[in-house]
Image: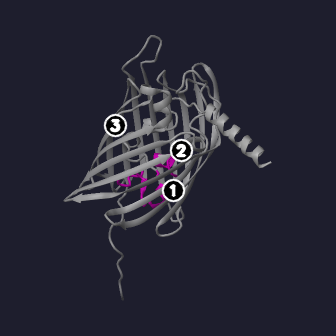
Amino acid sequence: MKKLIMSVAAAVLATAAFAYNPPVGGEEPFRFSNPNMLSGSSSSAAGGPSFNVVPDSIIYNPALPAQSEIITVDLGGSILFNTDKEDGDKSKGYGFETGVIVPTSFAAFTGTFNYVNSEMWRMSLGKIWDIHFGTSKDVLDWLSVGVNLYFRRYSGYDLDSENAFGADFGALARLGDVAFLKDLRLGASVLNCGKPADFKTLGMDNDDSCSKFPTIFTPRAAASATIFEAGKWVGGLSIDVAAPSMVQNFINDIAFEATYDQKLRLTAAWQFNLRESVEAESDGRSALSLGVSYKFGKKLGGKDSSITPALASQYLYDGIFALSTGAVVELGQKDTSGAEVEMW
């Protein structure tokens, strides 16, 4: 009986592994619609190298906005240029997103809307509409938890539309200073737990039919911390690992960020996707992504607020170049002063 169970389990795993064939870029399609995500500044389950949490961050870990103190709104857009277009191929794609974080005394509530349109052969995502609603809360001084609900709609290539929906779960631990690491943060999440869409397009292996994407049940873990300080310069590092579809693939994201006077951010990131590198070969490998942003103080609605415009770029997938821009608006100022006690 034991041998029979093991044989059945091995057969199921082998069948699942054979069926794993999302399109190139299909595991993280919403990273392309926002400069903070494309650059690696915010696309981490631990909040990025310097904990730059924007509304879209909940796509990687729904627990991240729990410690937000002020309303945060962002808007971003990207253009994807096909610099090595073949006959019959699309010459470009695009994406855009917007979102808001609303902190309350009970919890932080986040909503995001994403759209990606890419029907280029080397990044064949089709058209994807995505809505995320998340809530997050501090349960301990050092521990936050969160949950998302999402709905997606896929279309493209003159095929019928398909829907997907489900939930994401996440946690974030802020451990303070550990050895030479300052503000060490550990994040963990389980993403895409729900009904995937049966949307067919070109997979990373063109010889097989495309599997559902982003892949159902994707565990993700991350660590980030400040690694050096030199005057007004502060450097941070984040490392993420993900194992889509119950460990049928391995993805590693690494991002480094240097900030000056808490205003200027310079970010560089790199992603390694094992199956894309093996199955799609040169078509599935990306160069470094680069990003820059600068925070400006601004008076909005009678409040001292801030606007942070950002720009990011990356050479993707053998001929596809991404250029993304946008801005984050914080409606108010964080309370950095200590408590005051008045007597009599």
Q: What residue sits 41% from the left and 26% below the top?
A: 282
| The furthest residue to the top | 87
Q: Secondary structure at mark 3?
A: loop
Horizontal and vertical percent position of residue 58: 50, 49
Q: Is residue 188 above or below residue 192?
A: below
Q: What residue sits 50% from the left and 34% below the top?
A: 275
The magenta stretch spans residue 62:
yes
Q: Earlier in the sequence, mark 2 or mark 3?
A: 2
Q: Secondary structure at mark 2?
A: loop
Do labels 3 and 1 touch, CB within 8 Å?
no
Q: Tag 3: Cα neighbours inside 10 Å, few (<14), some, or many (≥20)?
A: some
Q: Quadrant of the C terminus?
A: bottom left
Q: Which residues are magenta?
A: 45-71
Residue 174 placement: quadrant? bottom left
Please identify the dominant SS of the magenta region.
Answer: loop
State the residue in front, 22 or 301. Answer: 22
Horizontal and vertical percent position of residue 168: 58, 49
Any mark on residue 288, and which? 3
| The furthest residue to the left | 231
Q: Is residue 292 above or below residue 128?
A: below
Q: Tag 1: Cα neighbours inside 10 Å, few (<14), some, or many (≥20)?
A: many
Please give the residue where the numbered disc 2 appears in the rendered image.
243
Identified by mark 1, the residue type is Ala
The magenta stretch spans residue 153:
no
Please give the residue where the numbered disc 1 appears in the rendered image.
63
Mark 3–mark 1 distance (CA, rounded to whole Å): 27 Å
Identified by mark 3, the residue type is Leu
State the residue in front, 184 or 324. Answer: 184
Identified by mark 2, the residue type is Ala
Q: Is residue 134 above or below residue 291?
A: below
Horizontal and vertical percent position of residue 3: 75, 46
